[in-house]
Image (cartoon, rainbow, N blue to C red):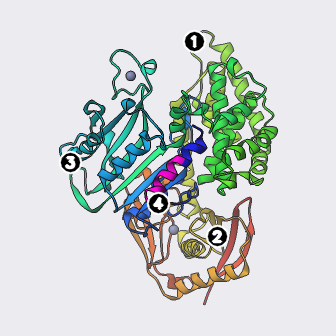
Amino acid sequence: MTHIEIRRRFINFFVKNDHLQIPSANLVARGDPTLLFINSGMAAIKPYFTGEEKPPHPRLTDIQKCLRTEDLESVGDPHHHTFFEMLGSWSIGDYGKETAVRLAWELLTSSQGFGFDPQRLYVTVFAGNDYLPADDETAKYWESLGVLKDHILRLPAEDNLWVSGPTGPCGPCTEVLYDRGEEYSCGPNCNPTCSCGRFYEIWNAGVFMQYFRKSETEFDDLPFLSVDTGAGLERLAAVLQGRDSNYETDLFSPIVTEVASGLNLSQLSPRQMASVRIISDHLRAAFFLIADGVVPSNKQEGYVLRRLLRRAMTHGVLFKIDQIGLFQRLSPVMAGIYAEFYPEVENPKIVQIMQEEYQSFLKTLKKGLNILREKIDLLGETEKGEEQVLPGELVFDLESTYGLPFDTQKDFAENFGIKIDQKGYQEAFKKHQELSRRGAEGKFGKVGEYPPEQIAPLHTATHLLHQALRDVLGEEIRQAGQSLTPERLRFDFTFDRKLTPQELSAVEAIVNEKIDRQLPVIKKKTSYHQAVKEGAIALFREKYKQVDEVTMYEIGDYSKELCGGPHVANTAELGRFKIVKEESVGKGVRRIKAVLERN
Ligand SMILES: [Zn+2]
Ligand SMILES: [Zn+2]
């Protein structure tokens, strides 16, 4: 069954059952400061479940573009990839467990659906724990549909209790496993709870959000029950197309074939095959990211894209692939698979941006790889026979000086049978972080060139400016840097075009209005989680997540931002805010220079 047919059958089935089909959201998570990329169908429509927004219909279905980068290091094996699509269906306070289970079974086993042999399907339900009862109800519904008793597995909370966080909605879930057959078995003791791959999860057929978790041990009932289902398209395609690896499905194989053109796929070593998969996965993800407006940069989404591209390019260099040509050839291949569903992948800008990134990376890459090569050769001479390890400090140096990502160097070194001293690398990384933290404090005047009281007014004004830019241009603009002198502020932010005079005067007017309102500037200690919940702007979210307590500055009811800089006590101290210049400082980054004039 082709991926096109899988999509069609899934969506048609739910539409026929009164679900409204909604389009895939952009890959970049908007309005959720805890998330860079949409990583599940649910993530894109979360406000419907929290009650913040009203859904267009109580029953929904879609196919959502997703990106997960937690397992980046594992990409290269036959199973991991970063970009994927998720087939999803939802009931928002509409039907409950009985209907959810019935719909799932019908879709999976009927001939208009996926036509699975019921004998090969197993389902899991929550076994209960000290605080919550077992989900006997769901087990009973599966049984009433004809699922054999010994095909219903009761699993503990780790497997079958879904939680959204330390507090928040949660509930039992039920998953469907497909028995791929004896030949996939790991041995005589293999059983449906085994993780060897014989019993393969094909669908999370229902997350039943029915409780609100107040603490580790306390749960309330939610006012209504909602159902969330999700299936990875590549995974389902692998099963329905009888493939061992998602890379062999029709969602990947044309890309893999193009990447490996000129190489004999069947004669590649496992390491070479891993390179082909890495290039295929990372470039596929990059096509989608750029199509959704991400450009390579050193911050946030842009940095993830840059890492993916550079890692793919490094493997391309190892293979001596003509990469400029490859990007061009992949364009129609991507369009062939995806344009029908995501016409944005045909944007000619994508190949252009990839080529530009390649050109700018190539010189440093070659220099970096040469140095790496020399060091590796040196190791070879001095430590013959022993296990060879590349010093972590060197790896960090090459990363910060030549932009050679850690994983790239690791792959490269492994090609020569050499390991990287990961601990040493992490130490070097920490040392560097400590230095740049001190540098940042310096910028805000703690040990810097200017006394804090001299730059506090302009720095406080950047908080207002930041929020005003978001109000005028959209929530997605992000601070990319700031620098202060007692005379002026410089504020860099992500945005892809010149601001109009109207936009500039609107921003200026908002800031001055807040100044006129004489808003108090209040410092609060809080948890990162709480700050984000209250909508605070967090610049280095990864950094803040690591610490228990963060400092948040509130300016009246207008701005909330995690910050460590010097601030005035009231906006009345600021004077008149005036933008003196707006300019570009690189692709997708704008700079505003502004001053405060005394009244
Ligand atoms: Zn097994
Ligand atoms: Zn601040």
Real-space Cα separation, disc 1 to disc 3, in angstroms:
54 Å
**Circle nearer the viewer, 1 or 4:** 4
Task: Answer yes or no: is residue 297 visible.
Answer: no
Distance from label 3 to label 4 (Cα)?
27 Å
- What label sits on residue 485 in the rendered view? 2
Ligand 1 visible in quadrant: top left
Helix, strand or loop at label 3? It is: loop
Q: Is mark 2 within 8 Å of ligand 2?
A: no
Quarter of the C terminus within the rendering: bottom right
Q: Which amino acid does label 2 sit on?
A: Thr
Disc with the residue nearer the chain's start (1 vs 4): 4
> Circle 4 sits on which residue?
45
Q: In this view, does 303 lie to the left or right of 367?
A: left
What separation in Å lies between label 2 and label 3 (alpha carbons)? 58 Å
Q: Which mark is residue 132?
A: 3
Crowding at mark 3 (Cα within 10 Å: few <14, some 14-19, many 20+)? some
Question: Which image quarter is the N terminus in?
Answer: top right
- The amino acid on which the numbered mark 3 sits, given as a three-letter code, is Leu
Q: Which amino acid does label 1 sit on?
A: Glu
Residue 591 appears at what percent x and percent y? 69, 67
The x, y position of residue 217, in whole percent, is 21, 50
Viewer-proximal residue among 544 and 239: 239
Q: Does the magenta stretch include residue 383?
A: no
Does residue 594 appear in this view? yes
Give the spatial CA distance, label 1 vs label 2.
55 Å
Magenta residues span 9-19
Q: Earlier in the sequence, mark 3 or mark 4?
A: 4
Task: Determine the residue positioned at 35% across, 51% down.
Answer: 100
